[in-house]
Image (cartoon, helix red, strand yellow):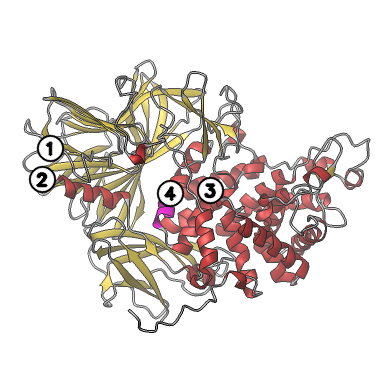
């Protein structure tokens, strides 16, 4: 009976009981065919409640990725092991009646978890109609106000409404409802929204992914405020506690709240939040981050609302008047004009503090932009200890992660060629850790991206050039998490994935419907614009399109939207790739590439290569037939483009047309994926010829790949690291020593000079197994024995 041992580390100092755990599990071809033949045991061998389903398969029909749901107990800061048994001789988890049940009604869906009963509407202004436990109802059933409301820059309010509701996922431990609707006013819709509401067996906590999408036909929306507010059934004796640390993880006492005495907590910048209460009148400014939760309670009941990444995605406001509990997803902070400009008494940690770009103006959302928040609602008895409420909040901020041994990902081949963590190579591993940095962006739009900030002539901080997570940067973060177990990388990588799916991806475009699904161009200004005037949209381009990180995230977490956006991106490439070049890039034109009469050479290898790679990446996971003809057309174009020595030429200077290795990495990766999918010999030949040309003619005198085939660009360039995955494949097929030498020199140069950016890590991981097999990683191996202990004190 095959077994897989995985680790579970509690990260927040909070004991968990019946805590939900969702994780993707990789399997090699032929290992597992029935997901029911998979069970989970604790360290003592006891069966744990679990359920598994297939998320992707190998060509032989066996499971490639399974998604596991389980419920576990773990003590604060504890580390334990889980044993996963799988195979045809494993008996499925014993069937038992689950308390998690969805009941379909004409107007709603009722969900029972065993701890709660919730009614979610199929239509109308309210999404959450009722939430109750035993005899207690938490929501005001008589309220007709919308749960979601948005205000434009003129102060006009647009009420949220539910258009449809369905069960998206269901197993005995986890159930997901998918609702969608919009914000309407007098028949006009300003924005749409999608909510994925996750219920868990035996749990009184709901998790909701709420996505706001500008999918209407106006070019942009200026959003003053957007709020989620639930009507409460509490009486006049309601009290509230906010997650605002007043000291070293100490919190203010609960205060009475009613219509004339509301409580507000506003995170208006990084390390800056304010708490206000009007009876007695209190305003507290704190130079710290709030923890993102608010509890409202009466003598018998309490509702707690928490948002994940609260300060990273400012501005946010939590508020209550005793009759409602609310969260402004985008808060109007313009009334906070009295925040202190000259703050004295700074601590050592505050020296050099620079605020992030202020959000004291209406949010400008260009057409096609989206934004997702992860929200948690807990319904239960009131807790007089704000510390315990904060522990619950931390358990949502830092969810449990199942750490599968990195060797497993290498052995199963789910990531292709992949280097697991090697403790014996700790000097090298330490360098790889240092090279992996999280994106620096903070704020409603910037969170999860790499951004440059500049002060404008008025002294305001402005977001300028953004990377838009180019070159599949989040994939490097996720794969380094898989290797090292550094949970912070998973959380920051998740934020990057959300940003890529929402802010960077074009979800709707009236004037350019061909843009839909594409990510905005790298080096855009403020994510979407061609220059700092922010008047013209930059749009997506197939030369800068990647989706591998979206699929990695989908398989590791099961988050459905990640697959949806990956498919949307693959379809964008299928539509937007430059197939028309095949009509003009003929054999005779290629032969005349350097003739003076050939004035125009509009052909760019990366426009073709990255489109081919994106489609190939998606097709490898989900072989949907509509992508094959598109990829075959690009293969034919590349075949006519490649010359007799294996070179593809790009425009370099006014007249120079030559090889650009870092761009050709896209072509080689695309050919590799197409060959793996189809076995076509033509693609294999083109891949080998292209790699051999670069290894023999595409390097500097020191043997490192140059930037471009031009005297002024004949210098080593770190972006050629993206060649490494395809070179590893060529070496495996041909054993070509010159290709090996080229890859090794590039790898060694990057590591030794510290020239590795975060996005490059995934490419290094794909090449390292080749170097390890050849003994070329031994120079980083720690072979120095420790001195013997002579027993001296």
Q: Residue furthest front?
A: 792
Report helix, strand or loop for mark 2.
Answer: loop
Q: Mark 1 or mark 4, which is nearer the start of the sequence?
A: 1
| Distance in Å between CA atoms under marks 2 and 3 | 45 Å
Counting residues from the start of the chain, the first of labels 1 and 3 encountered is: 1
Q: Are marks 2 and 1 in contact (CB under 8 Å)?
A: yes
Q: Identify which residue is drawn at 17% across, 53% down.
A: 115
Query: Looking at the image, is mark 2 or mark 3 earlier in the sequence?
Result: 2
Q: Residue furthest bottom?
A: 790
Q: Reply above or below: 377 against 420.
A: above
Dot 4: element: helix
Q: In the rendering, at what x and y percent does residue 269 appear?
A: 36, 32
Q: Residue under circle 3? A: 566
Query: From mark 1 to mark 3, how far is it between C-alphas?
Result: 45 Å
Q: CA distance from mark 3 to mark 4?
A: 19 Å
From the image, tell me which residue sits under label 1: 254
- Gap in Å between the C-alphas at discs 4 and 1? 32 Å
**Residue 325 position within the rendered picture, expressed as x and y whole percent measured from the top left:** 21, 34
Q: Whole-Å distance between the Cαs marked 4 and 2?
A: 33 Å
For the N terminus, which image quadrant? bottom left
Q: Which residue is labeled 2 in the image?
A: 384
In whole angstroms, how far apart are the C-alphas of marks 2 and 1?
8 Å
232 vs 750, nearest the viewer: 750
Residue 787 shows in this picture: yes
Give the answer, above or below, for where 419 lies relative to 546.
below
Say whether disc 3 or disc 4 marks the residue closer to the N-terminus: 4
């Amino acid at each position: 009976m095959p077994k897989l041992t995985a680790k579970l580390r509690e990260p927040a100092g909070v004991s968990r009981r019946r805590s939900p755990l969702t994780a993707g599990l990789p399997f090699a071809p032929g290992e597992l065919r029935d997901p029911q033949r998979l069970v989970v045991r604790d360290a003592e061998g006891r069966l744990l409640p679990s359920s598994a389903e297939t998320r992707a398969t190998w060509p032989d029909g066996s499971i490639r990725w399974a998604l596991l749901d389980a419920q576990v107990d773990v003590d604060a800061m504890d580390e334990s092991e889980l044993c996963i048994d799988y195979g045809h001789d494993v008996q499925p988890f014993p069937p038992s009646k689950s308390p998690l049940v969805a009941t379909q009604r004409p107007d709603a869906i009722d969900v029972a978890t065993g701890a709660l009963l919730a009614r979610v509407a199929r239509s109308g202004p309210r999404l959450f109609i009722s939430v109750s436990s035993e005899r207690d109802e938490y929501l005001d059933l008589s309220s007709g106000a919308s749960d979601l409301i948005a205000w434009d820059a003129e102060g006009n309010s647009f009420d949220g409404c539910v258009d449809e509701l369905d069960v998206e996922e269901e197993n005995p431990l986890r159930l997901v409802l998918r609702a969608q609707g919009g914000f309407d006013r007098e028949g006009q819709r300003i924005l749409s929204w999608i909510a994925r509401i996750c219920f868990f067996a035996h749990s009184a906590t709901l998790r909701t992914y709420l996505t706001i999408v500008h999918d209407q036909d106006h070019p942009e929306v200026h959003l003053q405020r957007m709020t989620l507010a639930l009507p409460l059934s509490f009486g006049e004796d309601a009290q509230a506690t906010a997650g605002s640390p007043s000291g070293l993880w100490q919190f203010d006492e609960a205060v009475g709240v009613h219509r004339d005495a509301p409580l507000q907590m506003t995170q208006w910048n990084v390390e800056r939040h304010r708490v206000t209460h009007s009876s007695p009148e209190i305003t507290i400014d704190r130079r710290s981050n709030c923890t993102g939760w608010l509890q409202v309670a009466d003598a018998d009941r309490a509702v707690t609302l928490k948002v994940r990444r609260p300060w990273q995605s400012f501005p946010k406001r939590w508020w209550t008047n005793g009759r409602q509990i609310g969260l402004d997803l985008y808060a109007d902070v313009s009334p906070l004009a009295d925040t202190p400009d000259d703050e004295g008494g700074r601590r050592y940690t505050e020296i050099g503090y620079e605020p992030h770009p202020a959000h004291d103006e209406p949010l400008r959302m260009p057409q096609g932009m989206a934004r997702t928040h992860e929200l948690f609602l807990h319904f239960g008895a009131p807790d007089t200890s704000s510390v315990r409420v904060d522990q619950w909040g931390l358990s949502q901020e830092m969810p449990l992660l199942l750490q599968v041994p990195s060797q497993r990902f290498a052995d199963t081949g789910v990531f292709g060629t992949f280097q697991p963590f090697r403790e014996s190579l700790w000097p090298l591993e330490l360098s790889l850790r240092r090279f992996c940095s999280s994106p620096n962006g903070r704020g409603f739009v910037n969170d999860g991206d790499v951004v440059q900030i500049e002060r404008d002539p008025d002294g305001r901080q402005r977001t300028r050039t953004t990377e838009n997570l180019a070159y599949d940067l989040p994939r490097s973060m996720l794969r380094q998490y898989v290797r090292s177990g550094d949970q912070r990388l998973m959380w920051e990588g998740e934020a990057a994935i959300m940003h890529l799916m929402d802010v960077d991806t074009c979800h709707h475009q009236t004037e350019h419907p061909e843009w839909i699904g594409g990510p905005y161009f790298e080096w855009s200004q403020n994510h979407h614009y061609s220059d700092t005037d922010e008047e013209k949209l930059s749009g997506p381009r197939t030369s800068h399109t990647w989706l591998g990180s979206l699929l990695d995230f989908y398989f590791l977490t099961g988050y459905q939207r990640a697959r949806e956006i990956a498919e949307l991106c693959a379809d964008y490439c299928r539509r937007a790739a430059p197939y028309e070049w095949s009509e003009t890039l003929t054999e005779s034109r290629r032969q005349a590439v350097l003739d003076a009469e050939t004035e125009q050479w509009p052909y760019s290898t990366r426009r073709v290569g990255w489109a081919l790679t994106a489609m190939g990446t998606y097709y490898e996971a989900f072989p949907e037939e509509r992508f094959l003809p598109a990829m075959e057309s690009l293969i034919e174009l590349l075949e006519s483009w490649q010359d007799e020595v294996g070179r593809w030429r790009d425009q370099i200077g006014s007249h120079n047309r030559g090889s650009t290795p870092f761009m050709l990495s896209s072509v080689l990766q695309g050919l590799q994926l197409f060959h793996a999918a189809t076995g076509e010999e033509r693609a294999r030949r083109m891949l080998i010829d292209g790699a051999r040309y670069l290894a023999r003619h595409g390097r500097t005198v020191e043997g490192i790949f140059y930037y471009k085939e031009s005297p002024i660009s004949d210098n080593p360039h770190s972006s050629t690291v993206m060649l490494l995955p395809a070179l590893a494949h060529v070496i495996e097929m041909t054993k070509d020593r010159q290709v090996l030498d080229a890859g090794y020199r590039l790898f060694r140069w990057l590591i030794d000079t510290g020239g590795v950016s975060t996005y490059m890590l995934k490419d290094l991981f794909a090449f390292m197994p080749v170097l390890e097999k050849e003994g070329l990683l031994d120079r980083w191996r720690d072979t120095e024995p420790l001195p013997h202990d002579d027993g001296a004190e």
